[in-house]
Structures are given as C-alpha cells and as structure tokens.
Image (spheres, helix red, strand yellow):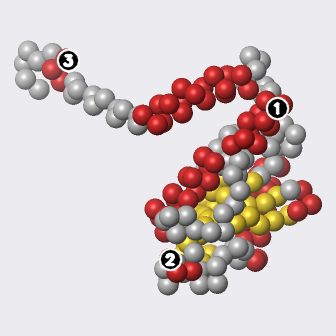
Amino acid sequence: MEAGSTSQERERPRASPPALPCAVRLQVTAFSPLIDVINRRDGTVNRGLYSVADRVLRVRASPRPDSSGVRSADFDVDASRGLLARVFSFSSPAAPRAPLPVVVYFHGSGFAMFSARQCYFDRLCRRICRGVGAVVVSVEYRLAPEHPYPAAYDDAVDTLRFIDANGVPGLDEGVRVDLSSCFLAG
C-alpha cells in the first residue's frame, strides 16, 4: 500500500443494481397494498381476503401447448387429503428425444400462503421447463396454519415417493424423463 493513501481511495465503487423492468415495478406497486390488507398488523393472515385473491390469481392447467411448446396437466398424488401436483412438459413434437431431467418445485410462501396453481408460479414453472429443458412438477401442498408443521414437508416427501413409484403422470407419450436426474427447487 502506498504511503499517504486514504481509505476512500482503497474502496472500490459499488455498482448500482439494475433497474427493475417497468412491468415488475407496476406489479409491485399494485400488489403491495393488497398484501398489506391481507396481512394483519399482528402478523396473521386474513384468510377470507386471501382466499378471494388466491381464486382470482389461479389458472387452469393447459393441455394445449403455449407458444413455446410447454403444456401443463394436474394429477392427484393423494386425493384423500387434496394433495396434487401440476406437471409442465413439452408436447410430443417439441420434446427432445433424450430423457428429460425432472425439477420438483415447491412454491414460495413459507408453507402458509399461495397455490401452485397461481398465475405467477404457473409462468415461472413454464419458464423453468422451457429454459432448463426439464419436466417441472409443481406441488400443491397443504398450508399452515390449517395444516400445521410438518404437513407441508410430509406432502413434499409423499410427492417425491409418488413420482419415484409411478413416474410423472400427465406427460405426452413421446416425453420421457430421467428420474436419476431429479432436482428440488423452490
């Protein structure tokens, strides 16, 4: 170090983070007040308002492929407790010939809110399927506090066991998976 150099001279300037796209900024602006209304001051969730928002944001599985060739289908893991999953895959003509890896996705929310069937998670799983070239299984696990710990973890493990025993249901005939290349995300 040179004699007489100051600490300011030694510090490197920090790069500013990239600006969020306009569409993302608008969504954050629109949904922040909604989230504030759903979350009570004491930290609990207003389930009545949440369930309305959840229903509005849900999308159906789409067996017809979108413009990028990704389709989706729902399947029951354990109907007795409402455990289901949505699989995202390429349609047969767009599917690669080699077996595809599987990504099992657990949507965010701290195991207390949201649904694997919400439009945001649906879009994210489609993007993962398309971008990574994998079959994505998004798990609709039971939520706390109605189903306390460890219910969501049990649902996650049971989904993995179901896939191991039965493969991935809901795929087109020409789509093959390689369960030895199974990844967890969420």
Q: Nearer the viewer, mark 1 or mark 2?
A: 2
Q: SS class of the residue under badge 2?
A: helix
Q: Position of residue 163 (x, y in %)?
A: 72, 71
Residue that label 3 marks: 7
Q: Nearer the viewer, mark 1 or mark 3?
A: 1
Report, in whole angstroms, how far the alpha carbon at label 1 lies from the one at label 2.
Answer: 41 Å
Residue that label 2 marks: 94
Q: Nearer the viewer, mark 3 or mark 2?
A: 2
Report, in whole angstroms, how far the alpha carbon at label 3 lies from the one at label 2.
Answer: 57 Å
Q: Are there few (<14), some (14-19), or many (20+) residues within 10 Å of tag 3?
A: few
**Cβ atoms at labels 1 and 2 below 8 Å apart:** no
Q: Is residue 111 visible?
A: no
Amino acid residing under circle 3: Ser
Examine the rendered structure and indicate whether residue 30 appears above or below residue 135.
above
Instruction: Give residue 54's quadrant in the image.
Output: top right
Q: Position of residue 114 (x, y in %)?
A: 71, 42
Quadrant that contains the N terminus: top left
* Dot placed on the residue nearer the N-terminal end, 1 or 3: 3
Amino acid residing under circle 1: Arg
Amino acid residing under circle 2: Ala
Residue drawn where x is 89% and y is 56% of the image? 81
Q: SS class of the residue under badge 3?
A: helix
Q: Are there few (<14), some (14-19), or many (20+) residues within 10 Å of tag 2?
A: some
Residue drawn where x is 15% and y is 15% of the image? 6
